[in-house]
Amino acid sequence: MTERTVESPLRLLLVHAHPDDEVINNGASMARYAAEGVHVTLVTCTLGEEGEILVPELAHLAADREDGLGPHRMTEIADSMKALGVLDQRFLGGPGRYRDSGMMGVPSNARPDCFWQADVEEAAAHLVPVIREVRPQVLATYDERGGYGHPDHIQAHRVALRAAELAADPTHAEGEGRSWTIAKIYYNVMPRSILKAGIERMIEAGQDVPFTAVEVDELPFAVDDDQVTTAVDAGAHLDAKFEALRAYPTQVSVEDGFFALSNNIGQSIMAVEHYRLVRGDLGPTGPDGREDDLFAGLRP
């Protein structure tokens, strides 16, 4: 094969399950790094065909009707990437190679074409050439629980980590580019204290924010604060994150600094995004003991 590489000095790869996951978890970080000249690559594993639709006039696109949501969400993710300034977004194995599996325990989990049923080695093989082309120093994805237990998030975690291992092995797929070892791998995390503060702000806002408030312990993705190793402040790019969230009207409602998915549970739109370093060396930290940069210790 003809080897291609990316020449930007700093390169970030994010692996997400569905369109919109990237903005919720990493949107401000992506906008910040793109603005700094970092090559930001997003690999999305499905088209999100099983998503619940918040726009009544588009209800006909639902999986149990016309099943046209996936192509529509491709237009949404394109608008989202434009808002964030990200130029390199790809679908794992090409658009539609893996179908959205739906929430855990539903019948769509059993479809042979869904991502949950995919062979991890085969799916990882689609990601290896991307890693070897882009040569990212940093990878961000979900933890082993997929954040909150969604099967596609769990599978994205498995595929991303396996692909990182395979890409680093010089004996694997020798015709698909030089081997590359990713220096730092992070999981997205949502610290309990930050989520709690956001819920309190939403309660104070009252009827101005039409979303449901729940106790922080009811949020399955909340983690203890001591799991956070890195806090990326991208407040200067919060407007880009707002715009990117609004690019997903079928999936996300945005009001007054908060957003909600189809469950109508409100969350604060965060300017500071949090991560846990799971592979690689922790870079310089601040007084709070955390890095403030995914590339801490790696910058030239």
Image: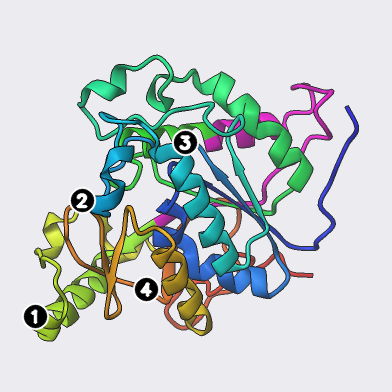
Disc number at residue 207?
Answer: 1
Q: Residue at x 73, y 33 (%)?
A: 129
Task: Point out the tag, 3 or 1, that comes first from the N-terminus.
Answer: 3
- Compared with 127, 222 (above or below) is below
- Say left or right for 182 vs 259: right
Of callouts 1 and 2, the N-terminal one: 1
Numbered mark located on residue 220 in the image: 2
- Label 2 packing within 10 angstroms: few (<14), some (14-19), many (20+): few
Question: Does residue 210 sit above or below 150 in this rendering?
Answer: below
Q: Nearer the viewer, mark 4 or mark 2?
A: 4
Residue indicated by mark 4: 270
Name the residue type under label 1.
Gln
Residue type (three-letter) at the residue carrying disc 4: Met
The boundaries of the magenta stretch are 160-188
Distance of label 1 from label 2 (alpha carbons): 25 Å
Q: Nearer the viewer, mark 3 or mark 2?
A: 3
Q: In the structure shown, which secondary structural element does the residue marked by tag 4 occupy?
A: loop
Q: Tell me where residue 289 sits by quadrant.
A: bottom left
Could you tell me which residue is drawn at 78 percent across and 42 percent down? 133
Kindly identify which residue carries mark 3. 46
Image x and y of residue 33, in percent? 63, 69
Q: Earlier in the sequence, mark 1 or mark 4?
A: 1
Judged from the image, the secondary structure of the residue bearing numbered disc 2 is: loop
